[in-house]
């Protein structure tokens, strides 16, 4: 889980033994039932990707609880919803499958879980039918799953769920920017 850059800094700060103990006791490569429950409870996560040259990108992925879910001990899936059409994250995954996901709970009990692994984008996955409004599905195979200390996580309470999240039986809400004169003539029709 560590490369030489990590090890050099661990040695400089005297934390190599602690880092090794954290891996020994907390790191896993398959999701536990507790991991699955936590991930399913989250309304968002952060997704780190990089292009073929290693240039990073980080994006926010959000939805109703259960939009990201563990479907097997070695598989996590989440939908791609209609967005700005840049496909920064999914394009990066197509060029470089290595990803990092950070799930954070900021409400009752602050908590975070990191998932590093490989991903692939699937446009015709049968599992997409379980994700209202999905235009693609991302499948993540974990390599390193581990919790992080929650001590610096602020406590926030949900004020309102996003009206833009696709929900069964509810009409889709388009963001105002898609109607702005500078974009209106190039916004493609919604696929899902």
Image (cartoon, grey):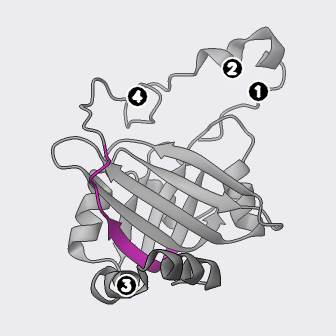
Would you call the spot at circle 3 few (<14 residues within 10 Å), some (14-19), or many (20 or more)? some
Contact between marks 2 and 3 (CB within 8 A): the answer is: no
Q: In front here: 177 or 135?
A: 177
Q: Position of residue 4 (x, y in %)?
A: 63, 85
- Secondary element type, mark 1: loop
Write the start and end of the magenta stretch as one range: 141-153
Disc 3 or 4, which lies upstream in sequence? Answer: 3
Vertical position of residue 115 compared to residue 137: above or below:
below
Left/right placement of residue 87 relative to residue 140 reads right
Contact between marks 1 and 2 (CB within 8 A): the answer is: yes
- Secondary element type, mark 4: loop
Q: Position of residue 136 (x, y in %)?
A: 60, 55
Contact between marks 1 and 3 (CB within 8 A): the answer is: no
Question: Badge 1 is on which residue?
Answer: 187
**Cα gap from disc 4 to disc 1, whole angstroms:** 21 Å
Identify the disc placed on residue 178.
Answer: 2
Identify the disc placed on residue 23.
Answer: 3
Figure quadrant of the C terminus: top right
Q: Position of residue 37 (x, y in %)?
A: 23, 63
Residue 168 found in image quarter = top left
Vertical position of residue 88 compared to residue 186: above or below:
below
The outermost residue toward the left is 108
Q: In front here: 32 or 116?
A: 116
Disc 1 or 3, which lies upstream in sequence? Answer: 3
Vertical position of residue 158 compared to residue 18: above or below:
above
Identify the disc placed on residue 105.
Answer: none
Would you call the spot at circle 2 few (<14 residues within 10 Å), some (14-19), or many (20 or more)? some
**Cα gap from disc 2 to disc 3, whole angstroms:** 46 Å
Question: Badge 4 is on which residue?
Answer: 162
**Cα gap from disc 1 to disc 3, whole angstroms:** 46 Å
Residue 142 showing in the rendered view: no
């Amino acid at each position: 889980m560590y490369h030489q850059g990590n090890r050099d800094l661990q040695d400089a700060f005297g934390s190599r033994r602690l880092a090794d103990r954290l891996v020994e006791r907390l790191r896993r490569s398959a999701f536990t039932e507790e991991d699955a429950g936590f991930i399913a409870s989250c309304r968002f996560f952060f997704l780190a990707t990089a292009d073929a040259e290693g240039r990073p990108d980080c994006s926010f992925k959000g939805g109703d609880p259960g939009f990201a879910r563990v479907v097997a001990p070695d598989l996590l899936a989440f939908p791609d919803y209609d967005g700005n059409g840049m496909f920064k994250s999914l394009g990066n995954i197509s060029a470089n499958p290595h990803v990092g996901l950070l799930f954070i709970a900021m409400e009752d009990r602050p908590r975070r879980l990191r998932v590093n692994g490989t991903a692939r984008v699937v446009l015709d996955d049968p599992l997409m039918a379980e994700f209202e409004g999905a235009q693609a599905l991302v499948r993540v195979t974990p390599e390193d799953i581990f919790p992080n200390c929650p001590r610096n996580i602020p406590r926030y309470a949900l004020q309102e769920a996003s009206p833009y999240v696709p929900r069964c039986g509810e009409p889709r809400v388009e963001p105002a920017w898609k109607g702005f004169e500078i974009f209106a003539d190039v916004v493609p029709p919604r696929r899902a």
